[in-house]
Amino acid sequence: MDFIMSCVGFAVGLGNVWRFPYLCYKNGGGKLLLIVFSVIRLLQAVPPQYRTINCLNESLIIVGLGYASMVIVFFCNTYYIMVLAWAFYYFIKSFNSTLPWSTCDNTWNTPSCIEIFHHEDCLNGTIGNTTYGNLTCEELADGRSPIIEFWENKVLNISEGLNYPGSINWELMLCLMAVWVMVYFCVWKGVKSTGKIVYFTATFPYVVLIILLVRGITLPGAYDGIMYYIKPDWSKLGEAQVWIDAGTQIFFSYAIGLGALTALGSYNRFHNDCYKDAFMLALINSGTSFFAGFVVFAILGFMANEQGVDISQVAETGPGLAFIAYPKAVSLMPMPPIWAALFFFMLLLLGLDSQFVGVEGFVTGILDLFPGKYYMRYRREISVAICCLMCFIIDLSMVTQGGMYVFQLFDYYSASGMTLLWQAFWECIVVSWVYGADRFMDDIARMIGYRPFPWMKWCWSFITPCVCMGIFLFHLFNYKPLTYNNTYVYPWWGEVIGWCMALMSMLCIPVSVLYKLCRSTGTFMERWEKLTKPQWGSHHLEYMSPDTDIKSLTSLSTDTEDSKVIIFESVM
C-alpha cells in the first residue's frame, strides 16, 4: 500500500490540475482531447521502465536508458518545484483579511483593473464603477481582472522577454527555499518515511477539489464553461498539435520515462503484482485529470460570463491558468481567506509528493552507481542535500522577472514532449527486440504468477514504438518556435538552449551504445551478444527454478523477503 500511495502521489500531481486543463483550454475542449487521449492510450502499452542505472547487469548495452531517465528526472525536479513555490507564495498571501488578488487598490494594479464587471448595465454607453468613476463600454472591454494582474504584475512581475532577466523576487526566492527544505526532510531518510507521508498528501487534495467543484457549478456561467470543456471542436482533430499534446500528456502525467516509479518499484517484494498496480494507477491518474477539468472550466465559465468575453479569451493558455481559475474560485466562497489557505495548502501537498518522489528516484539512481564497498555514513543525507542545493541554484533563474520564460523553456524541451517519446521508443525496442518480448513475458509471469494479456507484447513489439516514433516525427516536422502566452516568440539562442537540454538526455542512449561497443572485445557479433545478454543477480536465482513451466503458470507462492531487489515495473 505504501508503494501504491507513493505512485499515486507522484503520478497524480499538479499536472492533473494544471497541465491537463490548460491543454484542453488550448486545444478546443476536454472531450476532444480526451478522445484523442484515449485512442493513443489504447495503442500504447509502455513496457516496464528499467531500474534507473543498474538494470540486471551494469555492463549491458542498454544502460544508456538509465542515464537518460536520470537526466530527465533531474530537469523535471529542477523546474517542477517552481509551481510549488508559486503555490506556497499564494498560501502565505492567503493569511490576510482581504485576499490581495481580489481587489484593485494595490500598488501592482493598473487603471484597467476592474473588480466587478457589469456588462448587463452597458446599454446607454456608460457604466458606473465605484472605484474608477464612469467607464465607457469600450474601456470596459479592455478591463482586466485583479486576479490576472496579481499573477502577472506581482507574482511574476514579468519582463519583456528572455533576454531581460531583471531582478530577483526575494519573496518568491524565500518560498522556493522553503519548499526545497520541505522536500529535503521528506526524502533524506528514504522510502520508509516518504511511504507514510503520502497517505495524507495523496488523499487530501481530492477532498478540496470536491468542495471547489460543488461551489463552482453553482456560479453563473459555470454551465457554459463545462460545456466548453466537454463539447469537442472537431475542426482541431486534423491539427498535429492536438495529437502531440495528447500523446506527450500521457507520458508526462503517468511519469513514464522518468525512472522514479521504477525506483519505487525496486523496493517491492519479488512477487508484487505490478501488472494490476499499473492498471490501477492509470485509472486513478486519468480520472483525476478529467475530474479536475470540471473544476477549472466551471470557474472559467463564470469568469467569462462576468467579463462578457468568450471562454477562450478569459485567461492565458499556460501554467498560469491554475493560478487564475483556482484563486477566483476561493475568492467567491464564504470566508475566502480560509478557503484560499486550505486550497493552496492542498496544491502544495499535491506537488510535494510528486517532487519528493522524483528526488527519491534521482537519488536512488545516484547511490546505485556506487557499490556497497564505497559505503560511507550519512551518504544518503549528503547526496539528497547536494541534489537539492544544485537544483535550487538553477532555480534562481526562475525567480527573476524573466523567470517564467526560463520555466517554460525547461517545461517544453527538457522533461516532456520529444524527450519522453524518444525514451519510451527505445524502452520498447530494448525490451522487445534486444532483451526479447517472450523472455520478458516469462519474467513477469515468474514474478506475478500469471502471464499478462498478449496485447501487451504486441504493443511493446510493434504498436507502441510506431506510435511513439510517429508522434515524435510529427512533432519534429511540425515544429514551431516556442512562444509565451501566444504573443512572445523566443529568440533563436533561447531555442538553442532548449534543444541542448533535450539532447542531453536523448544522446545518452546512442552514446552509451557506441561507448560499450568500442570498449568491449571480439567481433561485432561477439560484442553485441555479450552486451545484450542479461545476468540475473544471485538474490533472484531462488525464483528461477528450471522446473517451472512458465507457459502454464497460474500461481506462485508469495515470498516475504524484505530485501530490496532490482525488478521491472510494468507501467502501462
Image (cartoon, grey):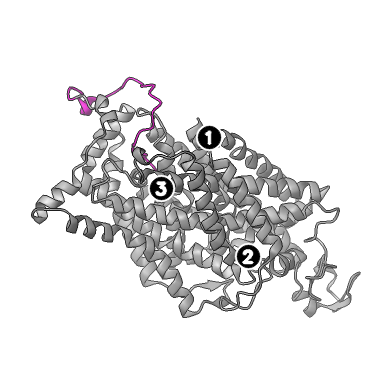
Q: Is residue 94 left or right of residue 241?
A: right
Q: Check residue 49 for magenta coloring.
A: no
> Which residue type carries mark 1?
Gly
Disc number for residue 500: none
Q: Check residue 562 for magenta coloring.
A: yes
Total number of numbered discs in the rendering: 3
> Which residue type carries mark 3?
Ile
Among numbered discs 3 and 1, the one appearing first in the sequence: 1
The stretch in magenta equals 546-572
Among numbered discs 2 and 1, the one appearing first in the sequence: 1
User: At x 39% / y 62%, what residue is drawn?
Assistant: 418
| Nearest to the observer: residue 451 or residue 525 | 525
Q: In the rendered view of the protein, which quadrant contains the C terminus?
A: top left
Secondary structure category for the residue under label 1: helix
* Magenta: main secondary structure: loop
Identify the residue under disc 3: 366
- Residue 38 seen in this snapshot: yes
Is the residue marked by circle 2 packed among few (<14), some (14-19), or many (20+) residues within 10 Å?
many
Q: Position of residue 91 (x, y in %)?
A: 72, 52
Identify the residue under disc 2: 399
- Disc 3 vs disc 1: which is toward the camera? 3
Q: Are marks 2 and 3 in contact (CB under 8 Å)?
A: no
Query: Residue farthest to the top?
Result: 557
Identify the residue under disc 1: 195
Q: CA distance from mark 3 to mark 1?
A: 20 Å
| Nearest to the observer: residue 25 or residue 446 | 446
The answer to which image quadrant residue 54 occupies is: top left
Among numbered discs 2 and 3, the one appearing first in the sequence: 3
